[in-house]
Image (cartoon, helix red, strand yellow):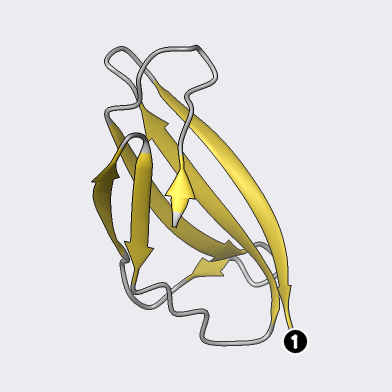
Amino acid sequence: DVVVCAKTGAAATGLAVDAHMPAHRHGMNYRPTVVMKGSGRYRAEGLLLHMPGEWEFRFDVRTAHRSERATLGVEIP
């Protein structure tokens, strides 16, 4: 689950979520789905991190006029 606040102060109109392994230069084998839950809350499902190592989650927040990206690094043992 993700709570979104666009950096620009504009209301978020959508969210895309993906994960990537920078060291291996590849992402997941499947595309996750994102469901809007209301009040800036979203649920991403189908995130299959298929191998251990450093992963980077990418959150693309859409507003009426632009898209902003936030990233979060995570280590999977």
Q: Is residue 24 left or right of residue 1?
A: right
Q: Quadrant of the C terminus?
A: bottom right
Tell me which residue sits at (47%, 42%) in the image. 3
Q: Quadrant of residue 35?
A: bottom left
Does residue 41 sit above or below 45 in this rendering?
above
Q: Quadrant of residue 56?
A: bottom right
Q: Amino acid at mark 1?
A: Pro
Query: x, y percentage for residue 6?
Result: 47, 23
Q: Quadrant of residue 41?
A: top left
Tell me which residue sits at (29%, 36%) in the image. 14
Q: Residue furthest front?
A: 39
Q: Quadrant of the N terminus?
A: bottom left
Q: Is residue 25 left or right of residue 5?
A: right
Q: Which secondary structure, mark 1?
A: loop
Tell me which residue sits at (43%, 39%) in the image. 60
**In terms of depth relative to the viewer, which is nearer, 49 or 8?**
8
Q: Which residue is mark 1?
A: 77
Does residue 61 sit above or below 66 in this rendering?
below
Q: Is residue 68 left or right of residue 32?
A: right
Query: x, y percentage for residue 34?
Result: 29, 55
Query: x, y percentage for residue 68?
Result: 48, 27
**In terms of depth relative to the viewer, which is nearer, 65 or 7?**
7
Does residue 14 sit above or below 42 in this rendering?
above
**In terms of depth relative to the viewer, which is nearer, 17 or 12?**
12
